[in-house]
Amino acid sequence: MSSTDKPAERSGAAGATAPPPLDQAFIENNQLIERYLEGKLPYKGGRDLEAWCRAHPEYLQKLRFAERTVAALKLLEASDKPADLAEPRTPWWAKPQTPIAAGLVTVAAIVGCLLLSGKVTVLTGRLEDASVKLRQGTLAPPGSMQSLRIEPDRSATAGTARLTVDRNVPQLIDLSIDMSWSTEKRFRVTVDKRDQARVLVLGDQAKDSNGNLRMTFNTSALAAGPYDIRIQALPLLGEPVDSGWMVLDVH
């Protein structure tokens, strides 16, 4: 085979894959007019046939479409059936807007899935962190122990008796509250987080031999902020009596 025959073979192969041209012979061999009138042509095939007939009006004149249409209308009038000349409705799936709408819905669904996946990842991370905290607990083991002694204010407005601790440096605080000046033996200690809620109530606490009330706590167990501590004497008869106040500052 000569080199001059190769381009011809390529062009022949390309022509074999190309769609057949729309001409009179193709229209008649495939009965495109009849299928169009019966509504059996696909959307694109119908539009292509309309474009070809618009470019070749003599073909419809040859088929005497005008005379046949008038005769068909007369037959419809004779049968008392109304002539519906409206263009047939295109099915929703054949309209050009359908692929566009489907694409927009697909994009919206993908974006929604990505957002939902991101939220699930965040919530999963938070759940894992909470599980770790639950297993480990909120308290950190104290690295040391410190003994402190303080004399509380005898007035609620004094604000001079203050104790400061650092929750980021876990310590076990052994606190001695000097109540040696009081003749009462038993007391109640109430701890409130300022402007929030009650944290702790130690009821019926007895003084030691030095006249001190003793309480021990882990600094990592307290959230940062000020705590108001109130001490009430518990006489054998009668109501509790306010006897001392102090402030615990946690940083």
Image (cartoon, rainbow, N blue to C red):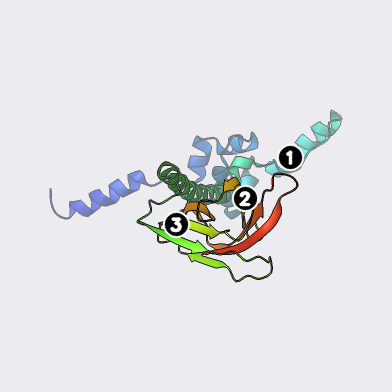
At horizontal 80% and vertical 37% (from top left) the residue drawn is: 83
Residue 22 in sight? no
Judging by the rendered image, the residue that carries numbered circle 1 is 69
Amino acid on which disc 1 is placed: Thr
Q: Residue furthest top?
A: 79
Judging by the rendered image, the residue that carries numbered circle 2 is 187
Specify whether 80 is left or right of 190.
Answer: right
Nearer to us of marks 2 and 3 is 2
Closer to the chain start, of discs 2 and 1, is 1
Nearer to us of marks 2 and 1 is 2
Amino acid on which disc 2 is placed: Phe
Amino acid on which disc 3 is placed: Ile
| Disc 2 to disc 3, C-alpha distance | 20 Å
At horizontal 59% and vertical 34% (from top left) the residue drawn is: 40
Pick whichever, 131 or 54, lies toward us: 131
- Determine whether the residue tagged by mark 2 lies in a helix, strand or loop: strand
- Mark linked to residue 124: none
- Determine whether the residue tagged by mark 1 lies in a helix, strand or loop: helix
Judging by the rendered image, the residue that carries numbered circle 3 is 173
Closer to the chain start, of discs 3 and 1, is 1
